[in-house]
Amino acid sequence: MNLNELEQQGHDEGLDSFYISFGDLMVILCVFLVMLLSMSNIEVGSFEKVKSVMTGKTENTLVSLAEDLSEIINGIPGVPGASVQLDSDGVRVNLDTSVLFEQGEAVIDEQALESVDIILKDILQTEYQVDIEGHTDDVAYYRIVDGETITNWTLSGRRASSMALHLRRMGFKADRIRIVGYADTRPVVDPESKRGIALEEARARNRRVSLLIR
């Protein structure tokens, strides 16, 4: 074997080693990416906050939607009993149930919808999903109506369902809507340590229908 052949053989062996090492590296990277994806829980609100900061643009994002809804709610004439915030999981609009429903009822007051519809029309123009969450306070509620047992759980679910039906009438597609009743399990203010007026105020804040736009 001459010198040229030896050099070529060494060159080929070097390339083989490089390809093997490069292949191992790709395998390791693929495994690493799979692990990241399996462990990650990317929340839309957080992602769009980061995206708006990186790009300097907020158009057509949850960030801009939260700003628009805030202007509507806090503007003139405003929306009584409503608040909005951008959470890690999306834009959350809280609606006071005392404005929407009679005590212990799940039929929405049509007059109250006149102001709420301004918010809903803005959301309708987007393509985001809308989770409708019903919440009650911690006061035990138990009634039997026409043989049906009504509790905090069923009341919160029925109120969320009433709002969902209204959204459908407005033109929201069914596959954009999800409803859930949480009863008193997710309070905004923990009532355990409250007494007197503070307790009543906490319970009033906890009685709500939340729209989570995500």
Image (cartoon, helix red, strand yellow):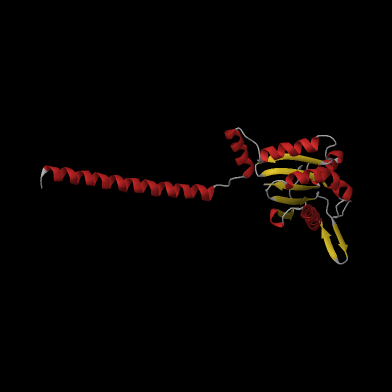
Residue 203 visible here: no
Tell me which residue sits at (70%, 43%) in the image.
91
On the rendered structure, is 147 left or right of 125?
Answer: right
Question: Foreground residue, 125 or 99?
Answer: 125
Residue appearing at x 18%, y 46% in the figure: 9
Q: Which of the pair 19/138 is nearer the observer? A: 19
Instruction: Look at 26% across and 45% down and name the residue there.
Output: 15
Q: Is 2 placed above or below 175 here? A: above
Tell me if residue 144 comes above or below residue 105 in the rendering: below
Q: Could you say where residue 49 lies in the image, as x and y percent from the top left?
A: 62, 37
Label total for image: 0
Picture coordinates of residue 182, whole percent (x, y): 75, 53
Nearest the viewer among 156 and 214 is: 214
Q: Percent x, y for residue 200? A: 85, 42
Q: Is residue 54 left or right of residue 64?
A: left
From where the camera sits, is residue 35 visible?
A: yes
- Residue 85: quarter of image: top right
Question: Farthest left residue?
Answer: 2
